[in-house]
Amino acid sequence: MVLANNTRLNVHPVWKHYENVEYIEIDFSGLTTDDEIIDYVLKAVDLGMRRPDKSIRAFVYAYQMKTSPRAMRTIKMLGKQVQPKMKKSVIVGASGILSLLMKIYISYTKSNIKYFTDKETAMKYLIND
């Protein structure tokens, strides 16, 4: 999440817990350059690849994220690699062109990521089996 002075709270993806359920928080908010986005995705995939299949729950923030076709190609490739590890995933804040790019991502990776407009509803979905 980006603070008012453009300081990012999470510069790396992190494992968190909510109601005794572990999930990875992936916060793309405010990232705008290909290099920032690709580096962040690489870190998230690295964390995820260490887990058993179908064990990862992911909470993705995408407020004010901007991306390019180049970055999306990399995101799609890495996303396809990590999909066998994914149990559930949600995204909050994807709008405009990013929403369209996410539909392409979903089609390519066969992701089951669900779109939400608020964090609380997304979290309830993410932690329930």
Image (cartoon, rainbow, N blue to C red):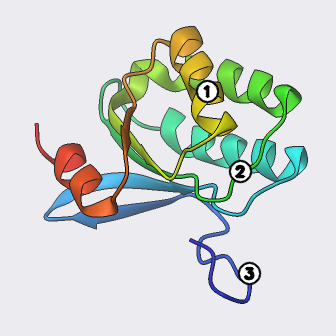
Q: Is residue 12 above or below residue 50?
A: below
Separation of disc 3 and disc 2 at Cα? Answer: 17 Å
Q: Amino acid at mark 2?
A: Tyr
- Disc number lying in front (1 or 3): 1
Q: Is residue 27 left or right of residue 34?
A: left
Secondary element at image label 2: helix
Q: Amino acid at mark 3?
A: Asn
| Quarter of the image that includes the C terminus | top left
Q: Amino acid at mark 1?
A: Leu
Q: Residue at x 67, y 59 (%)?
A: 64
Residue 33: where, in percent of width, then height?
88, 51
What residue is shown with label 1? 100
| Quarter of the image that includes the N terminus | bottom right
Q: Is residue 4 above or below residue 115?
A: below
Q: Is residue 114 above or below residue 79?
A: below
Would you say residue 21 is visible in this rendering?
A: yes
What residue is shown with label 3? 6
Between 127 and 21, the one nearer to me in the picture: 127
Quarter location, residue 54: top left
Secondary element at image label 3: loop
Residue lying at the far bottom of the rendered structure: 5
Q: Residues within 10 Å of mark 3 (few under 14, many from 20)?
A: few
